[in-house]
Amino acid sequence: MSADVLVEKKKLENPPLEIHQIGDRVLRMNAKRIAKVDAEIRQLVREMLQTMYSADGIGLAAPQVGIHKQLIVIDCDPENAANRPLILINPAIKQISKELCSYQEGCLSVPGVYMDVLRPDVIEVSYKDELGRPQTLKASGLLSRAIQHEMDHLNGVLFVDRVENQLALTEELRKRGFSHRDVKIIS
Ligand code: QAP
Ligand code: CO
């Protein structure tokens, strides 16, 4: 089997995986470390990428498709065929900046809801790539935001848990047919 995880960036009529939505308990479970990056993991990466592109996303974590493994796929430029998606396996934050910044987040598991969230501006993360090679990456801006958001999923945390304006959040969730009871305030 090919070690290359790249897939065509297009929308499939029948994406291979189902994305779970807020209220589903699978989103609240902790993901387990991946002991060995093998062909089975690389097949999961391909299916997660296809599912993400099909849903117009820029990031997807394995727990969102009901798989409790520490695996994230990110593509901050999905329209650009030349931009390689980022695959993070067993990611760990090594450093975070003191500076926080606010950014409007969304999530494929909370469709239609977009709210401001405060997070560290710059992060340094270590992880293994799709070939099991150790990597480190310093990220800022949209990429930093995407990594932090997706890493939260590995710990059963959703961006709505970090929203400060709970009144506005309650209203947005209600508009989209979700319940504020499915939010777990952490900060
Ligand atoms: C996480 O989010 C993220 O509501 C990835 O109707 C958030 O891909 C990365 C999406 C903020 C960086 C900044 C959301 C698609 C996609 C929706 C996503 C929707 C359709 C969200
Ligand atoms: Co998300």
Image: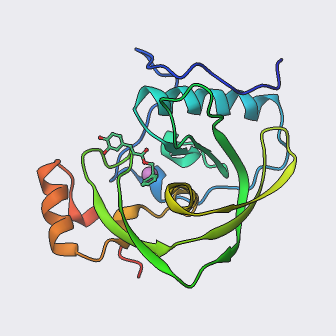
**Position above or below: 163 against 1:** below
| Extreme-bottom residue of the structure | 98
Protein image colouring: rainbow
User: Can you say whether 162 is above or below 6 in the image?
Assistant: below
Using residue 74 as the reference point, say whether residue 176 is left or right of it: left
Q: Residue at x 69, y 49 (%)?
A: 88
**Position of 3 relative to 25 (above/below):** above
Q: Nearer the viewer, residue 31 or 12?
A: 12
Q: Residue at x 24, y 65 (%)?
A: 181
Q: Is 25 on the left-hand or right-hand side of 165?
A: right
Can you give x and y, in whole percent of width and height, for residue 38 in the image?
A: 84, 34
Residue 7 appearing in the image: yes
Residue name at image x 15 percent, y 73 percent: 167
153 over 94 or under it: above or below: above
- Front residue (pair 116, 72): 116
Residue 78 location (% of width, % of height): 50, 33
Q: Using the rendered image of the protein, determine whether residue 183 is visible from the camera's viewpoint.
A: no
Using the rendered view, name the quadrant where residue 4 is placed: top right
Q: What quarter of the picture does the N terminus occupy? A: top right
Please identify the residue farthest to the top as the structure is shown.
Answer: 13
Where the C terminus falls, by quadrant? bottom left
